[in-house]
Image: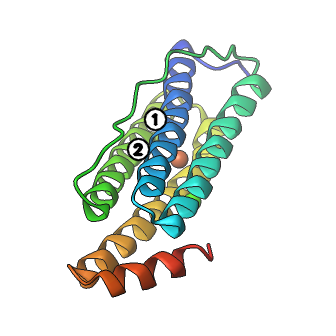
């Protein structure tokens, strides 16, 4: 099998950076929730951050398997404050929508380059993005339902600690 094309290698390295940024963003959200005394939300976000590191490692290992060179760029500084838990989760959902778009673009590029192995590799990520968007929109819906009721927020926080 031929090595990765320059274009695909560059896009894979970019996606690797995006996954590391995702981990950083969710860790930042975990810190924000800790500050708000929402331990369940914080622990949920920490688990999400760990998952993002796994996504990054999948890409790292794939680049190596294909004989490519991993190149690590600087990770953008994430926001550290949000107006409310609802705003934080809304931000996370928007972020995941962008990640989905960038994976879709990577998939399209692999198709254009005739890189079938990368297409197949990306199937897992395409499916994973369906889960990511669905779980964040579910959480957003629950926060909307809780509204300004502190008791509902506390109940949601304790449910989230079980993830
Ligand atoms: Fe991810
Ligand atoms: Ca996931």
Percent x, y of residue 63? 69, 26
x 48%, y 41%: residue: 22
Q: Quadrant of the C terminus?
A: bottom right
Percent x, y of residue 45? 52, 57
Instruction: In the rendered view, tell whether residue 163 sits above or below residue 23.
Output: below
Which is more toward the observer, 48 or 102? 48
In the rendered view, does 31 fall on the left or right side of 3?
left
Percent x, y of residue 150? 30, 81
x 57%, y 19%: residue: 9
x 68%, y 45%: residue: 54
SS class of the residue under badge 1? helix
Label 1 C-beta lies within 8 Å of the nearest ligand 1 atom: no
SS class of the residue under badge 2? helix
Pick whichever of labels 1 and 2 is earlier in the sequence: 2
Local packing at callout 1 (Cα closer than 10 Å; few below 14, some 14-19, many 20+) is many
**Quadrant of the image occupied by residue 144:** bottom left
* Number of the label disc, if any, that sits on residue 156: none
Instruction: In the rendered view, tell whether residue 22 sits above or below residue 77.
Output: below
Which is more toward the observer, 35 or 21? 35
Label 2 C-beta lies within 8 Å of the nearest ligand 1 atom: yes
Which is more toward the observer, 161 or 20? 161
What kind of colouring is applied to the model shown?
A: rainbow
- Which residue position holds label 2? 99
Measure how far apart labels 1 and 2 are at the Cα level.
11 Å
x 53%, y 74%: residue: 160
Instruction: In the rendered view, tell whether residue 60 sits above or below residue 121.
Output: above
In the rendered view, does 120 fall on the left or right side of 7?
right
- Which residue position holds label 1? 106
In the rendered view, does 125 fall on the left or right side of 79?
right
């Amino acid at each position: 099998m031929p090595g990765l094309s320059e274009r695909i290698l560059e896009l894979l390295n970019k996606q690797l950076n995006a996954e590391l940024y995702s981990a950083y963003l969710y860790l930042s959200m975990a810190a924000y929730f800790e500050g708000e005394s929402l331990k369940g939300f914080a622990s949920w976000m920490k688990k999400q951050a760990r998952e993002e590191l796994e996504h990054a490692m999948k890409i790292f290992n794939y680049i190596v398997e294909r004989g490519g060179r991993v190149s690590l760029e600087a990770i953008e500084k994430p926001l550290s404050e949000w107006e409310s838990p609802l705003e934080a989760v809304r931000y996370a959902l928007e972020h995941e929508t962008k990640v989905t778009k960038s994976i879709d673009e990577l998939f399209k590029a692999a198709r254009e380059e005739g890189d079938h192995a990368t297409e197949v590799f990306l199937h897992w990520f395409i499916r994973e993005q369906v889960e990511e968007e669905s779980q964040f929109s579910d959480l957003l819906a629950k926060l909307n339902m809780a509204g300004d009721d502190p008791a509902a927020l506390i109940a949601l926080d304790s449910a989230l600690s079980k993830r």
